[in-house]
Amino acid sequence: MFRFRIVSIFLICLINQALKAQSGIEGQLIIDTTIWRPIAYLSIIPDLEKLYSMSNDMIIDAVDIDASGKFSFNTRYFPQEDNLFRIHVAKKSDPPASLNIGGREENYFFIVANNQTHIIVKDFNNQEFIKNVSVKGYYPNDVIKQVNEVTGYLDSTSIDGSFIKNDLIKSAVFEKLRIIADTCSNPVVSLYAIYKGDFEKNYSINQQFYEDFLNKWRQNKSSYFEAFRKKIPATNSVPLAFAVIVAFTSLLAGFFICLIVLVLLKKKNNIVQDLSIQERKIYSLVLEGKSNKEIADTLMIELSTVKSHLSSIYAKLNISSRKDILNLNLNK
């Protein structure tokens, strides 16, 4: 019996060592080395509020990408529990801690991993850099991809779509993300879906959902959930009569807000009704504070084309500068 226990312990140790030996992140990224550094950078995301933050302190490893695009990270020093990581590359003209968010030159993707996982990364698309990265070997990354595909529908909404249509698309996307968060068994991915669903703006509308979500994961003490809990207001029970009054007041306020929105939309439509579809897109991006280069990158057009459209917008709206566009938007 004693010998059997010794053999069993020995076998368990061998299995654990074998698993650790197989752990790691390896893959292949197709990059143009005349533009991009042949280096893959690995960052740990300490708080999901910092999904798109970047600093040198966040980078925990950097490895070479060889001539065939292959790279490999050792993950034995990772924590035992799942964490969210980001892999990115940087342009030769940019510092290593640089993120390009959105557009054709988006340079990063997220993965979930721990010190036991063995993950295979492959980029299948030369035309759209890092847009079609496949992450295999650990199932939570399949859900990460699903979340990213769902949120991708938000990018398809634009100024040439009606206000109602865009609002319906956003509502459907956020509802789908809440369903993913509610049904996902991995806490990190579940919370990732919550953050991608812009929960801070939707909390008041779906308060009960977020309270139930926190209750479901009440035993989870990770830094991710501790940070999330601080963003959710403490719930207090209120008398039914008070709740009814609040609900009725909110209904009236909602009615008047709808009336105001309809009036504002009518005014906005009068301002831009003479603009072409492309001019409307550029008009919207100017309102967001985008520079000519950022507009060109977002719409994937030449800088000279942006300038030409702006000249046309100025003429149609009888204005002479970007400042006039912003003033029109404030006064409409």
Image: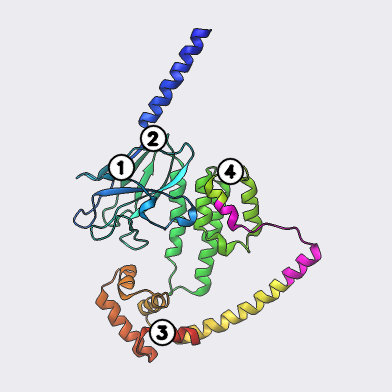
Callout 4: helix, strand or loop? loop
- The stretch in magenta equals 227-248
Q: Which mark is residue 76?
A: 2
Residue lying furthest front: 57
Q: Amino acid at mark 4?
A: Asn
Q: Residues within 10 Å of mark 3 (few under 14, many from 20)?
A: some
Q: Can you give x and y, in whole percent of width and height, for residue 306 in the image? A: 30, 77
Question: Taking 154 as reference, is 248 above or below it?
Answer: below
Q: Which residue is under mark 3?
A: 325
| Disc 4 from disc 3: Cα separation | 49 Å
Q: Amino acid at mark 2?
A: Arg
Q: Which residue is under mark 1?
A: 27
**Magenta stretch encompasses residue 189:** no
| Disc 3 from disc 2: Cα separation | 54 Å
**Magenta stretch encompasses residue 247:** yes
Q: Residues within 10 Å of mark 2 (few under 14, many from 20)?
A: some
Q: Which mark is residue 220?
A: 4
Q: Can you give x and y, in whole percent of width and height, for residue 56 in the image? A: 35, 53
Q: Can you give x and y, in whole percent of width and height, for residue 260 in the image? A: 60, 81
